[in-house]
Image (cartoon, rainbow, N blue to C red):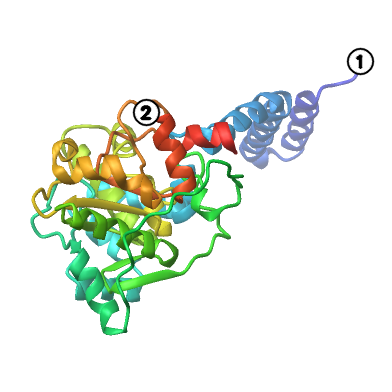
Amino acid sequence: MKKTFRENIIAKFAGIARSHKGLKYPCLAAAAVVLFFYYVSMHFVNNGKRYVSVAFVAVFFMSSCSFSFAVFAERTGFISAQETYSAIVEDSDITLAVEQTVDPTEQMILEEDNIALECETTEDTEDVVAYSLDDLLENREQDGYQAPSTDVAMAGEEYVFDSSDWRLMLINKQHPIPEEYDFTLGTFTAGMRCDERIIEDLLLMMQAAKDDGVNLEVCSPYRGDNRQEYLFNRKIKNYMGQGMSYMEAYKRASQIVTVPGASEHQVGLALDIWSDTYKSLDKGFEDTAGGQWLAQHSYEYGFILRYPEGKEYITSIEYEPWHFRYVGREAAMIMKQEDICLEEFWDKYL
């Protein structure tokens, strides 16, 4: 009968031990090590399919589930994500972990314009820098810019939408910003930037509101990657300070602050807006003159309320009556008329 591998190994080392009495214990140890690695390797060979299946499920979960680190890790790297976790748990000041990666140019802009605080939520809004229509026009008028007419010409009813249209780009947890996407920032001041292609309609909208007695202010325009990471990490830390676990805090934070790499602010198409009479980004803004004017007229200038009430199960973001996204007048008019969000528009028209 053919001997097994185990029997051969034992016999071999036993023979050496019998021939050399002084090698008895070294041979015993060597046999044990060889057999240990043999059984470990055979375990993985016999259970290889199981491990491959588990790995496939894990990869699928991380790449497709909205409650995952896929987008975040894509932008920051796995090592960076682990460092962020350690900073949240161990460091009393998360700013230190983030500021180490801030681009020097962006850091200079933040410091010069005193916008270290961002009006992403109702927290810390007293020191937030906001920009009124007059503020936005000031520098542009110095360059000979003339304020546009507020006459609005809506597009005809028939319009063919294209999924490659930059205005309709779908950005959310499941659809992060494409790596190859490129755009040009239009700058009013160092602290107020957005995609230059939306500036004309933004000024038109703010001028029309002012003509109706509503003074709108933009307080959260374009944000760079580092800034978005900082806001997201800060929100996680706040929730962990309330007793949540890291995973619970991450899930809750992702419903309020968009996961880095999946924020429309990072491509200059989204703006947080309040008015000169109500400087808080909370649900109460919907009942103000500014909130009601935007809800009724923003679509006329190509802007939509990006995260409407009742659509949270689709957008995965809480209702934000202050967050507006540019999609172009044709699409905005349809979304307003049919009371649908951008995700629903894509399902129906693209």
Label 1: how many Cα within 10 Å (few below 14, some 14–19, many 20+): few
Q: Residue at x 49, y 46 (%)?
A: 330
**What type is the residue that disc 1 sits on?**
Met
Q: Quadrant of the C terminus?
A: top right
Horizontal side of 337 relative to 175 (left or right) equals left
Q: Mark 1 against mark 2, which lies toward the viewer?
A: 2
The numbered mark at residue 311 is 2
Horizontal side of 152 relative to 88 (left or right) equals right
Q: CA distance from mark 1 to mark 2?
A: 72 Å
Q: Residue at x 30, y 71 (%)?
A: 147
Q: Residue at x 58, y 42 (%)?
A: 158
**Which of 263/249 is in front?**
263
Quadrant in the picture for residue 160: top right
**Which of 24/50 is in front?**
50
The numbered mark at residue 10 is none
Lower position in the chain sequence, tag 1 or tag 2: 1
**Which of 302/172 is in front?**
302
**What type is the residue that disc 2 sits on?**
Lys
Quadrant in the picture for residue 311: top left
Q: Residue furthest bottom?
A: 143
Q: Quadrant of the N terminus?
A: top right
